[in-house]
């Protein structure tokens, strides 16, 4: 039941996986929900990612080694992690703030907050897909980290030990002699792998489309190709949105616009320090043999996603602004990076090439909660590379904050107020 103090209507800006999740949990509270998007439902970063739901990803990008990797990339145009030299005061300020946090203490602090929301999200996904008719190729087969070299195995063993000691997240170690029997699609000469059995995977476009369709059937309104033109405010509140579909009013507003969110910082009267981290993927027909397990290849920084009706390679982290190109060399790089590992690393039947802008924060934590100066505006953005993995917990937390229900996880680490 909705109390008299609770809003009757919530308007969500952004229909990616996070916006869809917010709509789900808000509508479960009995609220009227409208979702608008400047393009199509989940047509941006939520569409062509690798589909991992990975509680094992508790270590943030702000790890000590990241700073050196970023600096070297200035001189390496083909680096998987690349900072493109350009004049952008906002980006260089972001990089400075990011660099300040690339230390062991900050890494572990951020990891605690990431573990809380990732564990919650996994629990919510299991409940959602058990109770709702969403067919999205949900598979709890874990995530396999495959290493080509003995040096890579030693380095990753240290990472796994850190995850075990500090977060209770452990993998099953698979030595190279056992690996081909475990995953026949892999080559024989690999050093080994680490299998995080608690991870899962989905086909993200199916999850998005089926979940959104289910919400439509239950009364949630989706307005596609609805461009936000102006936010009208009065008395410390948002009054209405001016859009290409006309004026839209609501009691509460949730901004879930991913990498675009930073452009709304001034009108929302708060800092939203997000930089777009561009990634790519190529989806093709299934190779033979096709991997049984989704996997990451850390030494080449490539993700491999076997789907029932396709096969995807995805990677890269480019800080190059809002660049919309898909360079052929990046797609070729994805294909060639998988060659040292897989018997049949790719096929010639390309179904889709794709890019997406990940909403990267300088502390690797999402931005979730009420804006400091507008009492009816909430942010649900900044999920870095883990939007899919964190979506359900984010939606649940936003619904709790909007309806003044005691939050199921501590919201403080994700609060927009941390940037004031």
Image: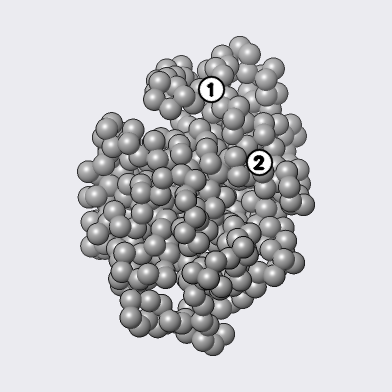
Image quadrant in which the C terminus is located: bottom left
Q: Quadrant of the N terminus?
A: bottom right
Residue position for label 1:
171
Residue found at x 63% / y 18%: 179
Look at the numbered disc 2 and give the secondary structure of its residue.
helix
Query: Residue 313: x, y in percent?
Result: 59, 43
Q: Is residue 155 above or below residue 279?
A: above
Q: Quadrant of residue 94?
A: bottom left
Query: CA separation, marks 1 and 2?
Result: 21 Å
Q: Is residue 153 above or below residue 377?
A: above
Task: Tell me which label, 1 or 2, sits earlier in the chain.
Answer: 2
On the picture, is 123 further left or further right than 150?
Answer: right
Which tag is nearer the camera, tag 1 or tag 2?
2
Q: Which mark is residue 126?
A: 2
Could you tell me if residue 417 is visible in this image? yes
Question: What residue do we see at 65% from left, 73% from top?
Answer: 221
Query: At x 22% / y 50%, what residue is drawn?
Result: 96
In front: 26, or 94? 26
Quarter of image, res 212: bottom right
123 to the left or right of 386: right
**Numbered disc 1: secondary structure:** loop
Nearer-the-camera pick, 300 or 18: 18
Give the residue displayed 55% in from the left and 66% down from the top: 3
């Amino acid at each position: 039941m909705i109390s008299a103090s609770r809003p009757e209507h919530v308007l969500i800006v952004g229909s990616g996986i996070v916006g869809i999740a917010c709509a789900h949990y808000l509508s479960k509270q009995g609220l009227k929900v409208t979702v608008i998007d400047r393009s199509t439902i989940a047509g941006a970063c939520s569409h062509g990612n690798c589909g991992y739901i990975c509680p094992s990803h508790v270590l943030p990008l702000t790890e000590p080694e990241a700073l050196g990797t970023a600096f070297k990339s200035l001189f390496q145009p083909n680096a998987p992690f690349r900072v493109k030299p350009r004049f952008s005061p906002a980006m260089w300020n972001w990089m400075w703030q990011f660099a300040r946090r690339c230390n062991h203490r900050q890494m572990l602090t951020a990891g605690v907050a990431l573990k809380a929301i990732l564990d919650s999200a996994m629990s919510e996904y299991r409940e959602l897909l058990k109770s709702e008719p969403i067919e999205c190729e949900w598979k709890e087969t874990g995530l396999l980290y495959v290493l080509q070299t003995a040096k890579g195995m030693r380095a990753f063993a240290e990472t796994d030990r850190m995850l075990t000691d500090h977060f209770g997240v452990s993998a099953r170690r698979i030595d190279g002699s056992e690996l081909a029997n475990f995953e026949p699609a892999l080559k024989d000469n690999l050093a080994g792998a680490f299998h995080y059995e608690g991870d899962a995977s989905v086909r993200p476009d199916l999850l998005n489309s089926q979940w959104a369709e289910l919400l439509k059937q239950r009364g949630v309104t989706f307005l596609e190709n609805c461009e936000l033109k102006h936010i009208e405010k009065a008395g410390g509140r948002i009054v209405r949105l001016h859009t290409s579909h006309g004026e839209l009013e609501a009691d509460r507003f949730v901004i879930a616009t991913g990498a675009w969110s930073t452009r709304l910082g001034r009108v929302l009267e708060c800092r939203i320090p997000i930089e777009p981290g561009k990634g790519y993927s190529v989806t093709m027909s299934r190779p033979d043999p096709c991997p049984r397990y989704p996997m990451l290849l850390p030494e080449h920084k490539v993700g491999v996603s076997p789907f029932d009706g396709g096969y995807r390679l995805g990677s890269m982290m480019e800080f190059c602004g809002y660049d919309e190109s898909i360079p052929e060399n990046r797609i070729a790089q994805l294909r060639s990076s998988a060659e040292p590992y897989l018997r049949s690393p790719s096929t010639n039947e390309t179904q889709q090439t794709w890019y997406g802008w990940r909403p990267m924060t300088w502390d690797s934590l999402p931005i979730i909660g009420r804006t400091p100066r507008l009492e009816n505006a909430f942010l649900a953005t900044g999920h870095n590379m883990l939007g899919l993995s964190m979506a359900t917990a984010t939606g649940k937390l936003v619904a709790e904050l909007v309806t003044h229900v005691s939050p199921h996880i501590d919201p403080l680490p994700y609060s927009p107020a941390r940037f004031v």
